[in-house]
């Protein structure tokens, strides 16, 4: 049974892990945080789970919808009319009953049911190669060192992080340079549980020209998904920034104050007393600025990088952190590994037959 080491327990890592574990591979997933989900990580509010970053489904999310059908939760998707600020028409967007944590949990269950293992609080320090085996060196939460040997590696973090931990691999200089040249924008997301919402717009990303706001988008989650029991109304305020921006290093409290002051300029009737609770999330590698010149999803034989920055190449399109594209890439990588293993097995059987003859 071939071994696969997957670095990252976000959506792409879990989809890859589920597909490969079901195909009979020995799957080990390493997650740096204490919880799974990546950008889909959730928290418990009221009697519901809610994502720390805003998410929804689109009718065109074929790869993602296919996964929900595969794991048997497609019947838990409800579709809603969503009003975008500044647009006359409405869009249909989907949301999973119980939140996206329902998808994360069923993927984890499928992985463990098929013999896969998931380890949390594990920091990957280096990926190296010894003969035909990859060695992923890690540091555990208690500072102990740990190594995972595998035939295949799937890295689901940022391209720059992969470049930093792959010095033990014989990557070409051109490949390493392209990975390092992929720059990223960061995101700061303030999620608030409100007593009321001043707007019925699901998403607002255009603001009056004279209004100086430090954020890029307002997502009134509860204005669209109205049947959830959060004990209030969920709203996200999402900002784009570079890590060199002063706001990035500010305390959560100061960022919250800055965002809310700017929000009140748009909606003066809202008071601080309308906030029941809040939580701030910072994402260092949120969205890449450009696609690479060539396909870097397999920079070395049997080692794969599954990142939103690599869902296309040689393209002038601006990358977007869309779940569907990353899920499609995770599915493609899993299929390539399964087919490669089958080919090796067939070649081995053919050699045995020839030897016997």
Image (cartoon, rainbow, N blue to C red):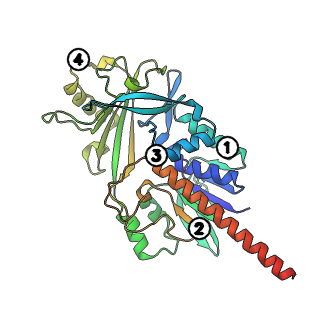
Callout in the foreground (4, 1): 1
Q: Is residue 36 visible?
A: no
Q: Which mark is residue 323?
A: 3
Secondary structure beneath dot 3 equals helix
Q: Sequence-wise, which precedes: disc 2 or disc 4? A: 4
Q: Is residue 39 visible?
A: yes
Identify whether 356 is placed above or below 234.
Answer: below
Q: Sequence-wise, which precedes: disc 1 or disc 3? A: 1
Q: Which mark is residue 110?
A: 1
Q: Position of residue 329 (x, y in %)?
A: 51, 55
- Which residue in the structure is indicated by mark 2? 302
Give the Cα separation between the discs numbered 2 and 1: 24 Å
Q: Sequence-wise, which precedes: disc 2 or disc 1? A: 1
- The reply to whether callout 2 and callout 1 are in contact (CB within 8 Å) is no
Q: Sequence-wise, which precedes: disc 3 or disc 2? A: 2
Secondary structure beneath dot 4 equals loop
Q: Position of residue 115 (x, y in %)?
A: 72, 49
Q: Sequence-wise, which precedes: disc 4 or disc 1? A: 1
**Which of the pair 89/305 is nearer the observer?**
89
Give the Cα separation between the discs numbered 1 and 3: 20 Å
Give the Cα separation between the discs numbered 3 and 4: 35 Å
Relative to residue 273, is residue 136 drawn left or right? right
């Amino acid at each position: 049974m071939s071994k696969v080491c997957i670095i990252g327990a976000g959506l792409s890592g879990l989809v890859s892990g589920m597909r490969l574990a079901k195909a009979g591979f020995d799957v080990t997933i390493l997650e740096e945080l204490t919880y799974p989900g990546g950008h889909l990580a959730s928290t418990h509010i009221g009697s519901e789970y809610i994502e720390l970053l805003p998410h929804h489904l689109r009718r065109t999310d074929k790869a993602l919808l296919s996964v929900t059908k595969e794991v048997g939760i497609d019947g838990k998707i409800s579709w809603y009319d969503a009003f975008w600020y500044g647009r006359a028409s409405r869009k249909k967007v989907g949301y999973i009953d119980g939140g996206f944590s329902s998808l994360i949990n069923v993927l984890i269950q499928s992985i463990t049911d098929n013999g896969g293992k998931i380890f949390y609080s594990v920091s990957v320090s280096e990926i190296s190669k010894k003969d035909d085996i990859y060695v992923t060196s890690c540091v555990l939460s208690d500072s102990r060192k740990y190594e995972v040997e595998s035939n295949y590696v799937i890295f689901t973090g940022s391209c720059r992080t992969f470049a930093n931990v792959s010095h033990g691999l014989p990557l070409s200089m051109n490949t390493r340079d392209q990975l390092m040249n992929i720059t990223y924008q960061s995101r700061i997301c303030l999620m608030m549980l409100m007593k009321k919402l001043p707007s019925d717009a699901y998403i607002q990303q255009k603001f009056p020209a004279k209004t100086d706001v430090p954020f890029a988008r307002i997502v009134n989650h509860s204005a669209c998904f109205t049947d959830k029991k959060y004990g209030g109304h969920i709203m996200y305020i999402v900002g784009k920034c570079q890590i060199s921006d002063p706001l990035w290093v500010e305390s959560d409290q100061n960022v919250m104050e800055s965002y809310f002051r700017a929000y009140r300029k748009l909606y003066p009737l809202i008071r601080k007393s309308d906030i029941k609770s809040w939580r701030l999330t910072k994402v260092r590698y949120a969205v890449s600025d450009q696609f690479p010149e060539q396909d870097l999803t397999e920079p070395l034989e049997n080692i794969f990088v599954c990142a939103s920055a690599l869902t296309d190449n040689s393209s002038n399109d601006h990358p977007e952190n869309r779940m569907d594209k990353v899920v499609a890439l995770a599915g493609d990588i899993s299929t390539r590994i399964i087919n490669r293993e089958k080919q090796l097995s067939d070649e081995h059987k053919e050699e045995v037959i020839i030897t016997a003859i």
